[in-house]
Image: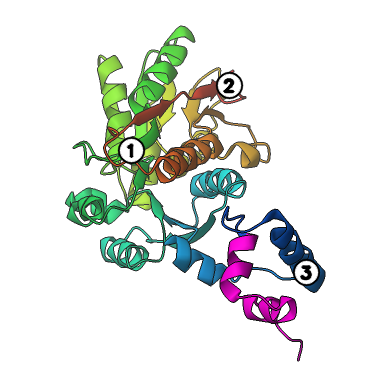
């Protein structure tokens, strides 16, 4: 078995104390330049590397950032995580990622693990069940434990006192509505499979603020959503659709094709899709690009600033990122 090079073995070989070796490697002013050079040269020669666990204990840091995502299957969160990873990987921290699976209890378990000295900071998008029950005490409690936390994407209506990063879901939909109106769409309907989620309600509110005679088709049950939408399209009045989420968007596209309607001429569609996957669709769907990777980067950046500043009295920041509407074949 290969002998592990330690501070003790370096000290023995140099005939100096372990404390002197440690201080030399940490550039202590108490140690002469000559001794530092001797220690560092031998450490390099012997391939010495500090024990990461010992370093963390000494600095009282874990060098870990905890990430809680609500859904592993949604490509939006995969892109957010990629953005987080890209930014954090250039720092001294690593990330630990957990998934709540839209469960309040699972979310509590994740936070409990993180707050038992396992991470230095937390990034979280709250679970659907947490949102529905409006139960945020387990998140608010994190502040009492002195652990920096940043909320992203699904931001509760009531301020919780944490930094937040999200897009303006309300204005996303009003912009989409304005575009369809410019295309001379007269009867624009709103379709959603997330009516109880915070982002779903904000998007619906944006639609309702513009529509004079609103048509809202919103069900969490996808089969019910599909059936109701198909029946509504058969009536022949709807000439524009705004979908609030990926599932609703794909259901809309399928229903329009099933009815034999011509995209952009008889009916137009704007929704939410994964930008990369959209190139594989036919027809390609016009979509609201939330730039999820940028959401991830900004969320991580916010937390890293908190961790590096170590100041707890800085007021919470609310970062609202801009989105863009990418026009494709369904509403060109």
Element at label 1: strand
**Which of 234/177 is in front?**
177
Left or right of residue 29, residue 165 in this image: left
Q: Are marks 3 and 1 in contact (CB under 8 Å)?
A: no
Asked if residue 132 is positioned above or below residue 318 in the image, the reply reads below
Range shown magenta = 1-25
Q: At x 74% / y 80%, what residue is drawn? A: 13
What is the quadrant of the C terminus in the image?
A: top right
**Residue position marked by numbered label 1 in the rendering:** 163
Left or right of residue 202, residue 327 in this image: right
Q: Residues within 10 Å of mark 2 (few under 14, many from 20)?
A: some
Q: At x 70% / y 76%, what residue is drawn? A: 10
Asked if residue 24 is positioned above or below residue 156 in the image, the reply reads below
Q: Nearer the observer, disc 2 or disc 3?
A: 3
Asked if residue 251 shows in the view, the reply is no
Element at label 2: loop
Counting residues from the start of the chain, the first of labels 3 and 1 encountered is 3
């Amino acid at each position: 078995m290969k002998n592990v090079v330690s501070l003790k073995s370096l000290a023995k070989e140099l005939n100096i104390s372990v404390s002197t070796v440690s201080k030399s490697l940490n550039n202590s002013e108490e140690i002469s330049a000559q001794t530092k050079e001797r220690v560092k040269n031998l450490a390099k020669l012997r391939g010495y590397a500090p024990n990461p666990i010992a370093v963390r204990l000494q600095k009282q840091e874990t060098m870990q950032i905890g990430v809680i995502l609500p859904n592993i299957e949604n490509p939006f969160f995969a892109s957010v995580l990629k953005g987080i990873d890209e930014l954090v990987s250039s720092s001294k921290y690593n990330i630990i990622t957990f998934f709540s699976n839209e469960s309040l209890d699972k979310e509590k378990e994740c936070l409990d693990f993180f707050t038992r000295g396992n991470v230095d900071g937390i990034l979280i998008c709250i679970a659907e069940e947490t949102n529905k029950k409006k139960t945020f005490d387990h998140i608010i409690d994190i502040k009492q434990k002195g652990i920096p936390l940043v909320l992203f994407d699904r931001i509760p209506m009531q301020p919780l006192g944490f930094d937040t990063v999200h897009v303006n879901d309300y204005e996303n939909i009003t912009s989409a509505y304005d575009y369809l109106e410019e295309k001379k769409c007269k009867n624009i309907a709103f379709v959603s499979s997330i009516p109880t989620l915070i982002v779903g309600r904000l998007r619906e509110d944006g639609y309702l603020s513009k529509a004079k005679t609103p048509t809202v088709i919103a069900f969490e049950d996808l089969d019910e959503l599909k059936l109701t939408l198909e029946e509504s399209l058969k009536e022949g009045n709807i000439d524009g659709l705004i979908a609030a989420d990926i599932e609703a968007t794909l259901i809309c596209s399928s229903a329009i094709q099933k009815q034999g309607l011509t995209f952009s001429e008889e009916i137009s569609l704007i929704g939410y899709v994964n930008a990369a996957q959209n190139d594989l669709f036919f027809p390609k769907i016009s979509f609201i690009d939330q730039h999820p990777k940028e959401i991830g980067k900004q969320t991580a950046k916010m937390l890293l600033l908190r961790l590096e500043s170590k100041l707890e009295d800085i007021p919470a920041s609310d970062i609202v990122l801009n989105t863009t509407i990418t026009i494709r074949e369904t509403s060109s």
